[in-house]
Image: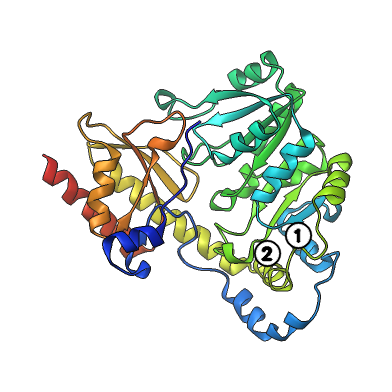
Amino acid sequence: MKSKHGANLFELAQKLGCNIEEFRDFSSNINPFGTSKKAIEKLSRNLDKVSIYPDPEYKDLKSSISNYCKCKTENILLGSGASSFINSFIKILSPKNSLVLSPAYSEYEKELLKINSNISKYFLKSENNFQINLDEFIDFINKNEINTAIICNPNNPTGTILTNTQIKKILQSTNCSLIIDETYIEFTDTDIYSCDSLCDFYDKLFVIRGTSKFFASPGIRLGYAITSNRNVIESFEKYYNILWDINIFADIMGQEMFEDVDFQKNTFDRITKQRNFIFEELSKIDFFKPYKTYGNFILVEIKDKDTKASNLYDYLLQNKIIIRDCSSFDGLNDRYFRVCILKEDDNEDLIKKIKNFINGRI
């Protein structure tokens, strides 16, 4: 298992002798347009609530999530970021045989190793544009007697995605529990791809969501999960649910963010437009092969055998631009990199600097 997360801005700033604010970080997949202004305004009007405890049942917050996700309130769990559910669901389900996609977020495998699960990997292949062959995937689950499969949807870093109809087919065709990490789902058409409403009907389904990426609010550490599995809900509340774990400011902001339809539409439209721009511009360059994506990031393969992602990384870093060298992802090699979507001017400059890099190597 190869494991390495994104850029350490503090370390890089010290290395280059500059301020963190000077970087344009294309390795960070957080919405660059910021969080909901309505949520910030509501928070500013309620700062005095720092002196009181939040509602221990979080009824208003859960109601907002229920309306947002079109699921039952009683099937919603709250936690300190999406990561808390990756950890707790794996421990509660404790699968003897598990499955993870590769390449994927390394924390899934880390947590499975902690419980000594027998881990199988389903590798997404470049020759298939990193797309999942659904029938093959179902056969893989059944032949390997997989108890729990973890799917990041859309997958990071490939951008691979399954529709909720396809997820439904997996649930109906296997005995496998599915943990679906929907960290990036709001950058897609949720009616087609999100499994949130399916949870009310399939107790083998566990959907994990957060507010860090789309809502650009990692600082409030608000995550939530949806499942109708009463045994798992009871175990979570007994062993992992901490009284007042969600602070009152996360409660206040969360309610407003989930109801701010204008913010959600504006973010989706701008990210989609800029994602298409970067993808189209990179597609025009014979040097690269960008892969179709449904996240707020694009995986790119360098076709030139003599050029590594680290070469491009080092060149851009001198221009205070940071991309993600994907050689540390299991299943990828040193010619893959990932760029996330930033603001319009930043994206245009990224393409310009990449072209300068290529011109210098031709």
Between the residue at mark 1 and the residue at mark 2, the CA separation in whole angstroms equals 8 Å
Q: Position of residue 272 (x, y in %)?
A: 45, 54
Residue 284 in view in this figure = no
Pointers 1 and 2 in contact (C-beta within 8 Å): yes
At label 1, the amino acid type is: Asn
Q: Quadrant of the C terminus?
A: top left
At label 2, the amino acid type is: Phe
110 shown above or below 132: below
Q: In percent of the image, x 67 and y 20: which residue is there?
A: 141
239 shown above or below 48: above
Residue 192 in view in this figure = yes
In this rendering, the count of numbered labels is 2
- In the figure, residue 119 lies in which quadrant? top right
Determine which of the numbered discs, if any, sits on residue 83 in the image: none
196 shown above or below 68: above
Determine which of the numbered discs, if any, sits on residue 67 in the image: 1
Closer to the camera in the image, 218 or 243: 243
Q: Position of 153 compared to 8: left or right?
A: right
Q: Identify the coloring.
A: rainbow
Closer to the chain start, of discs 1 and 2, is 1
Q: In percent of the image, x 29 and y 44: which residue is there?
A: 282
Closer to the camera in the image, 241 or 128: 241
SS for dot 1 = helix
Choose mark 1 or mark 2, whichever is in front. Answer: 2
Closer to the camera in the image, 287 or 308: 308
Q: In percent of the image, x 65 and y 51: which residue is there?
A: 82
For disc 2, the marked residue is 258
